[in-house]
């Protein structure tokens, strides 16, 4: 399987298998800019990472539908990311999570839980001293394409 570093900046993602919507389940978003960039995804019963492939080509066509790589996490990486995510949901919000129907929680106002501004500030101060998750040498186990914003109205 290819490594993330080989594909993220324009390598041919099609060397990995395309995954059907039934093969994975979106869990949460970590990075977002107009569309989700990265986050947690369940694949084959384990936590994996999704990462947008070559974000530089995002706006080349009007029919752009993002391509996401599914990256295998080592056990320690999965544990660290789960811990970081749990802190985020406790100290900031659960609004970036997906429910069982792949709807983002922030589109379901009765399910959104936001923490205080003080707690959120504390979380972001803690994150400044945390090393970023380095997945560059992790294997890409597949890819999928499409909008994953999670709005039930399709936007």
Image (cartoon, grey):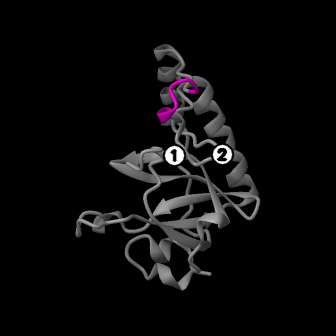
Disc on the earlier residue, 2 or 1: 1
Q: Please name the residue that numbered disc 1 is placed on.
A: 29
The answer to whether 48 appears left or right of 29 in the picture is: right
What's the residue at 54%, 71% (across, down)?
Answer: 143
Residue that sits furthest to the bottom in the current view: 15
Specify whether residue 43 is painted magenta: no
Residue 62 figure quarter: bottom left
Alpha-carbon distance for marks 2 and 1?
14 Å
Say which element carries label 1: strand
Q: Percent position (x, y) of residue 155?
A: 37, 48
Q: Are marks 2 and 1 in contact (CB under 8 Å)?
A: no
Front position in the image: 28 or 73 = 28
Say left or right for 109 vs 26: left
Q: Which mark is residue 82?
A: none
What range is drawn magenta here? 106-111
Q: Is residue 62 above or below residue 121?
A: below
Name of the residue lying farthest toward the front = 153
- Circle 1: is it few (<14), some (14-19), or many (20+) Cα within 10 Å? many
**Quarter of the figure that contains the N terminus:** bottom right
In the rendered image, residue 45, in percent from the top left (x then y), is placed at 76, 59
**Percent position of residue 61, x then y:** 23, 69
Question: As rendered, which of 66 and 82 lies closer to the eye?
Answer: 66
- How packed mark 2 is, by other alpha carbons closer than 10 Å (few <14, some 14-19, many 20 or more), is few
Secondary structure mostly seen in magenta is: loop
- Viewer-side label of 2, 1: 2
**Which image quadrant for residue 105?**
top right
Q: Which mark is residue 100?
A: 2
Q: Residue at x 31, y 66 (%)?
A: 64
Q: Quadrant of residue 49?
A: bottom right
Residue 106 pos. (x, y %): 49, 33
Residue 109 part of the magenta segment = yes
Determine the residue positioned at 29% across, 68% down. Answer: 57
């Amino acid at each position: 399987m290819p490594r993330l570093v080989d594909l993220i900046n324009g390598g041919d993602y099609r060397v990995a298998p395309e995954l059907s919507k039934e093969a994975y389940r979106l869990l949460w978003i970590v990075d977002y800019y107009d569309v989700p960039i990265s986050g947690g995804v369940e694949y084959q019963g384990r936590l994996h990472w999704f990462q947008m492939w070559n974000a530089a080509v995002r706006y080349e066509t009007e029919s752009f539908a993002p391509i996401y790589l599914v990256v295998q996490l080592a056990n320690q990486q999965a544990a660290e990311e789960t811990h970081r995510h749990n802190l985020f949901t406790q100290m900031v919000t659960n609004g970036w999570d997906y429910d069982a129907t792949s709807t983002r929680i922030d589109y379901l106002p009765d399910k959104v839980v936001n923490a205080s501004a003080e707690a959120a500030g504390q979380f972001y101060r803690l994150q400044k001293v945390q090393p970023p998750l380095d997945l560059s040498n992790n294997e890409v186990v597949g890819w999928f394409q499409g909008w994953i914003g999670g709005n039930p109205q399709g936007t």
